[in-house]
Image (spheres, helix red, strand yellow):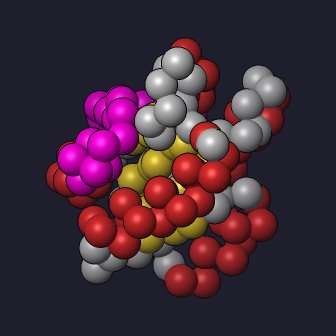
């Protein structure tokens, strides 16, 4: 069994802008993590199924569409229903600062806003997901 951190990077919803998700996926991969990129237009159900099938330690979602409250809520709900609430959920994108506390209440571990460096994301995943893997 691998002790490397396994991260599903997902682009939920109708948003077609995936450059940021691909940059983050590459940074995590370059940092030695196993990364599964889901591609565009994934439903919460598809994201959760991928996370479970791939035995992921974390799911990172990139949301630029404005539907972040609905999408994060649904992914967390489905993970709980499937007995996979131990999978760490984090994300980023165009998310208003005022929505971040509500997302955290839902169970989103971290939101990265525009301007976050890939190194800060890698460091956060190592610090917060590695403890779950160890």
Q: Point out the stretch of residues depicted in magenta.
A: 27-44
Quick one: 57 or 59, which is closer to the camera? Answer: 57
60 drawn magenta:
no
User: Left or right of 126: which side holds 25?
Assistant: left
Residue 18: x, y in percent? 23, 48
> For the image shown, how many numbered marks are present on the structure?
0
Instruction: Identify whether 98 is placed above or below 58.
Output: below
**Position of 114 compared to 113: left or right?**
left
Q: Toward the viewer: 96 or 105?
A: 105
Left/right of residue 13 with respect to residue 27 in the rendered view? right
Measured as percent of width and height from the top left, residue 11 is found at 37, 42
Query: Within the image, what quadrant is residue 120 found in?
Result: bottom left
What residue is rendered at 29% in x and 68% in y?
119
- Residue 61, above or below 68: above
* Residue 79 makes an appearance in the image: yes
Q: Quadrant of the C terminus?
A: top right
The reply to whether residue 18 is visible in this rendering is no
Residue 121, x across and y down, in percent: 38, 64
Residue at 53 percent of width and 83 percent of height = 97
Residue found at x 76% / y 24%? 82
Which residue occupies 54% across, 42% down? 58
> Residue 131 appears at what percent x and percent y?
63, 52
Observer-nearest of 3 and 10: 3
């Amino acid at each position: 069994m691998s002790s490397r951190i396994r991260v599903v990077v997902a682009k939920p919803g109708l948003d077609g802008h995936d450059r940021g998700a691909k940059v983050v996926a590459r940074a995590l991969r370059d940092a030695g993590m196993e990364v599964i990129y889901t591609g565009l237009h994934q439903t919460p159900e598809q994201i959760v199924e991928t996370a479970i099938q791939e035995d992921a330690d974390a799911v990172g979602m990139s949301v630029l569409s404005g539907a972040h409250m609905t999408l994060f809520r649904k992914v967390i709900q489905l993970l709980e229903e499937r007995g996979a609430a131990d999978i760490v959920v984090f994300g980023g994108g165009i998310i208003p600062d005022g929505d971040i506390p509500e997302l955290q209440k839902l169970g989103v571990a971290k939101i990265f806003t525009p301007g976050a460096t890939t190194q800060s994301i890698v460091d956060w995943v190592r610090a917060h997901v590695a403890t779950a893997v160890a």
